[in-house]
Amino acid sequence: MLQTIRKQFALSRMFLILFLTGMGIFMFLPIVFLFNNAFKPLNELFMFPPRILVQHPTLFNFEQLFMHTAAGVVPFTRYLFNSFVVALITTFAVIIVSTMAGYVLSKHRFHFKAFIMGAILIALMFTPETVSIPRYLIVSGFGLKNTYFAHVLPFLASPVAVFLMKQFIDQIPNPLIEAAKLDGASDMYIFMRIIIPLTSPAVATAAIITFQTVYMDVEPSSLYMSKETMKTLAYYVEAVSSNIPGVAQISIASSIGLLMFLPNLIIFLLFQRKMIQTMLHSGVK
């Protein structure tokens, strides 16, 4: 009887492993296609039915991209530089602001705390398009157009990051905070020496989400930037994909797609373990 149960358990476990392996391969196929598509010659890009793997790899698509950008007023490296500067500064600022807000909402008592948490929960339901006009009025009113700060400011108040940090900080024992205060530690010392180290998985998760959101967003470049030198790579990709006619559009779009995807993949691979820990401990599933 016991041996029969063990055999059934082993068989079901084997089927589960095979099923998950198949699902993993299926979900990995778009990434394989993206990498191979960037190195396909034109005849393979227009092949029907399309093939996932490249047969005759070439750098022709990247040559087309750099030839097109070399003919423009603004070099391709300027868009790339703007994207990295904006994404890194915004990610750092969002982490600091969200962690401070989460610490205050979790470990401090003050008036209207429940109201503020309710407002944050309601803000989670807003799509970016619904706040485009208020954002434009604020950026324009402060005279921030054509500045890097206009790229950063709209993302500073991140309801997702604040909610995530608050949920994670809730699990830090209150006696630990109170013991630090009894020893004479200030709020800033507790925040830097206790809260930040203990919330590193949530910080990594917020960093991944924020970096990917900012790196792929085109709204600040479209609405707040009239100078071409202040626009980001995401805006350039959208402009190239829609304005270049003919086969060159497909060729350049395939190489740009890989360049846009690589930073997000590297960031995710670096912090994926921390992100899984956050999902397990914060109850966000």
Image: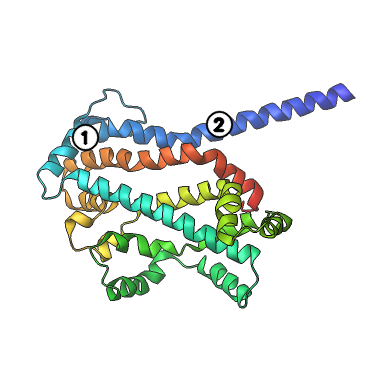
Total count of labels = 2
Residue at 42%, 57% in the rendered image: 93
Quadrant location, the N terminus: top right
Specify whether 96 is left or right of 137: right
Q: Is residue 81 visible?
A: yes
For mark 1, what is the residue? 62
The image position of residue 112, as x and y in percent, is 60, 77
Q: Is residue 159 left or right of residue 153?
A: right
Q: Residue at x 61, y 28 (%)?
A: 18
When asked about the image quadrant of residue 106, the answer is bottom right
Q: Tell me if 30 is positioned left or right of 11 in this view.
A: left
Residue 90: % across, % down: 39, 55
51, above or below 176, in the image: above
For the residue pair 254 and 268, the one nearer the viewer reads as 268
Residue 47 seen by the camera: no
Q: Amino acid at mark 2?
A: Gly
Q: Nearer the viewer, mark 2 or mark 1?
A: 1
- In the rendered image, residue 121, in percent from the top left (x then y), is placed at 57, 68
Return the residue found at the far bottom.
111
- Of residues 68 and 46, which is closer to you in this image? 68
Amino acid under label 1? Phe
Which element type, helix, strand or loop, lies under badge 2?
helix
Q: Residue 42 appears at what percent x and percent y?
A: 21, 33
SS assignment at label 1? helix
* Viewer-nearest residue: 11 or 116: 116
User: Marks 2 and 1, Cα distance to the nearest angstrom?
Assistant: 33 Å
Instruction: List the residue tagged with mark 2.
Output: 22
